[in-house]
């Protein structure tokens, strides 16, 4: 029998994991990668970038970090080498077509909107692939010779990521955007694309304004100070709201994992689909939930002197971690703030003028030679635009007042024979992608069937309520940050695995969970 072909878009972490597990299930994967290397966002980033997640949480379950990497937060080069070694170890490179950009995907035997809406189960019959062999057409552009080819595959896995390719550019009033500015405006993506020497020379001696307060903005600001801009040409970090950016994962010397990455911590949170008793318990334990946040916040405030710089966030640390916004602060960042080579400035909005930037409520411009927009990416648009069908575009985008509509954060109930891996975030995206791909592999293998469309859509509504409750304005980020064990429990139950992975009740309740707990389908207890 001919192997079913799986088309995988992207050779970042999720794409490599998908390729590896599809091979292990006996499928024929073909990976389309626009660049010339594996690694996704780790191919090229800022010189000083380090892993934000502690190394034990950020690893493949069946491929440990080499003993030569001793740091808790490895450098960009170490992470990239680790990912490349994984691809080589499992002989994945021969399944990847490099320099091939997917320009669109289209369902080969199109269905009318009425047919799609009439379904009561995924794909019309609850099966991952139809008996009549409906296929997806994947149109790719060869970057080397500009030719267009079309592949037909039985199933598509989109591993396009959400932190690359399409920059999120703020909107400005007419004639008050970058065109009004006499200096240079670039996105952090453009800065990262430069070689390290060129990037340093590009910012050297300039008055630089960095817009944003997440990891990219902090790293760029530090690199500006390293380029000897100093007090004469300080770097201004313009931000909209403060964040609980952590110095490390040891608040007051206590591992953060014991506060937010074990089963006990998840008892404090109202979970989607939980029963009455768990709901009641989360309500009763709400003071402890508040106490955990305050414990972490007090450490960050003290170590970074946030009150001194007016940088104390108005939201809780639980909201930060529930939104997957937690970022590590570069070493000595606030030392640079103290000496004046980095200036922090808050503004709800801004626009451009000839001399630089006009911030909300001020008449004197913030003089700048260069503005770097570290304002993130439009991963939702990238995911939407890959579909040629307007109907499927609308389905995958969902409502702007809801989270991205994916059941188990993997499949859309009304888009057949397709999965999305790596869009929804967690504390460790590598770990989470692996669990999702393993779940998908079991689904394709027939180990379990999906529930009805009505049940899946109900489940998605419950996760949407959870996100809005604990992430507030950041609900569109699609994050399982504070509920990764509860989420993995659902995947394990679907696959027929025992979700409890620890030895003994005490360890099960209080010991943090990580990738190595899911090496095998069976639990240890």
Image (cartoon, rainbow, N blue to C red):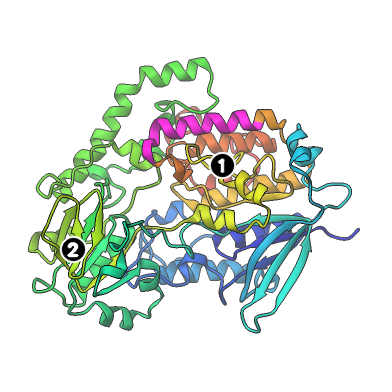
Instruction: Examine the residues drawn in magenta and state their main secondary structure.
Output: helix
Residue in the picture at 42% in, 18% down: 281
Looking at the image, is 128 positioned above or below residue 153? above
Marks 2 and 1 sit apart, C-alpha to C-alpha, by: 37 Å
Q: Which mark is residue 470?
A: none
Q: Quadrant of residue 101?
A: bottom right
Q: Quadrant of residue 317?
A: top left
| Nearest to viewer (mark 2 / mark 1) | 1
Question: Is residue 501 something one can see in this rendering?
Answer: no
User: In terms of secondary structure, where does tag 2 sit?
Assistant: strand
Residue neighbourhood size for the residue with mark 1, other residues' Cα within 10 Å, grouped as few (<14), some (14–19), many (≥20): some
Residue in the picture at 27% in, 50% down: 245
- Decide whether residue 460 is among the magenta residues: yes
The residue stretch that appears in magenta: 456-473
Looking at the image, is 413 positioned above or below residue 14? above
Q: How many labels, in total?
A: 2
Whether residue 401 sits left or right of residue 303 in the image: it is right
**Residue 499: % across, % down:** 59, 34
Q: Label 2: which residue?
A: 236
Q: Label 1: which residue?
A: 398
Closest to the observer: 269 or 251? 269
Residue in the picture at 51% in, 15% down: 276
Whether residue 260 sits left or right of residue 411 in the image: it is left
Looking at the image, is 259 positioned above or below residue 231? above
Q: Quadrant of the N terminus?
A: bottom right
Closest to the observer: 318 or 129? 129
């Amino acid at each position: 029998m001919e192997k079913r072909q799986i088309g995988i878009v992207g050779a970042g972490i999720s794409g490599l994991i998908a390729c590896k597990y599809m091979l292990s299930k006996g499928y024929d994967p073909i990976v389309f990668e626009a660049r010339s290397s594996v690694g996704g966002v780790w191919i090229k980033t800022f010189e000083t970038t380090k892993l934000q997640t502690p190394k034990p949480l950020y690893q493949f379950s069946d491929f440990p970090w080499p003993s030569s990497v001793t740091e808790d937060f490895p450098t960009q080069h170490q992470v990239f080498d680790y990912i490349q070694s994984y691809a080589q170890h499992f002989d994945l490179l021969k399944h990847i077509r490099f320099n091939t950009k997917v320009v669109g995907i289209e369902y080969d035997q199109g269905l009318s909107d009425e047919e799609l809406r009439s379904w009561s189960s995924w794909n019309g019959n609850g099966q991952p692939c139809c008996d009549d062999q409906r296929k997806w057409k994947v149109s790719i552009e060869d970057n080397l010779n500009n030719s267009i080819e079309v592949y037909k595959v039985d199933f598509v896995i989109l591993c396009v990521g959400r932190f690359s390719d399409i920059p999120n550019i703020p909107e400005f009033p007419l004639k008050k955007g970058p065109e009004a500015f006499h200096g240079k405006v670039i996105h952090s993506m453009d800065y990262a694309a430069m070689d390290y020497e060129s990037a340093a020379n590009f910012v050297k001696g300039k008055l630089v304004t960095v817009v944003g307060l997440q990891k990219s903005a902090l790293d760029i600001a530090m690199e500006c100070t390293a380029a000897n801009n100093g007090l004469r040409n300080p770097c201004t970090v313009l931000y909209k709201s403060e964040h609980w950016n952590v110095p490390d994962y040891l608040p007051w010397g206590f591992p953060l994992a014991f506060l937010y990455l074990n089963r006990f911590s998840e008892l404090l949170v109202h979970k989607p689909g939980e029963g009455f008793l768990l709901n009641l318990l989360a309500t009763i334990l709400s003071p402890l939930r508040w106490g955990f946040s305050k414990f972490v916040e007090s450490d960050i405030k003290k170590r970074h002197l946030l009150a001194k710089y007016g940088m104390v966030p108005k939201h809780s640390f639980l909201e930060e971690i529930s939104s997957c916004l937690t970022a590590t602060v570069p070493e000595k960042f606030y030392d640079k703030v103290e000496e004046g080579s980095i200036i922090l400035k808050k503004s709800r909005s801004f626009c451009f003028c000839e001399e630089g930037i006009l911030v909300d409520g001020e008449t004197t411009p913030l003089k700048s030679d260069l503005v770097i927009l570290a304002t993130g990416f439009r991963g939702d648009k990238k995911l939407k635009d890959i579909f040629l069908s307007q109907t499927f575009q609308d389905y995958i985008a969902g409502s702007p007042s809801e989270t991205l509509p994916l059941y188990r954060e993997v499949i859309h109930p009304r888009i057949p024979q397709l999965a999305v891996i790596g869009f929804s975030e967690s504390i460790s995206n590598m770990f989470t992608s692996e669990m999702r791909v393993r779940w998908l592999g079991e689904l394709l293998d027939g180990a379990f069937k999906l529930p009805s469309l009505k049940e899946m859509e109900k489940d998605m509504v419950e996760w949407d309520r959870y996100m809005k409750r604990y992430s507030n304005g950041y609900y569109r980020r699609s994050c399982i940050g504070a509920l990764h064990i509860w989420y993995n429990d659902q995947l394990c139950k679907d696959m027929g695995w025992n979700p409890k992975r620890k030895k003994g009740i005490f360890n099960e309740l209080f010991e943090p969970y990580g990738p190595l707990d899911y090496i095998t389908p069976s639990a240890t207890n």
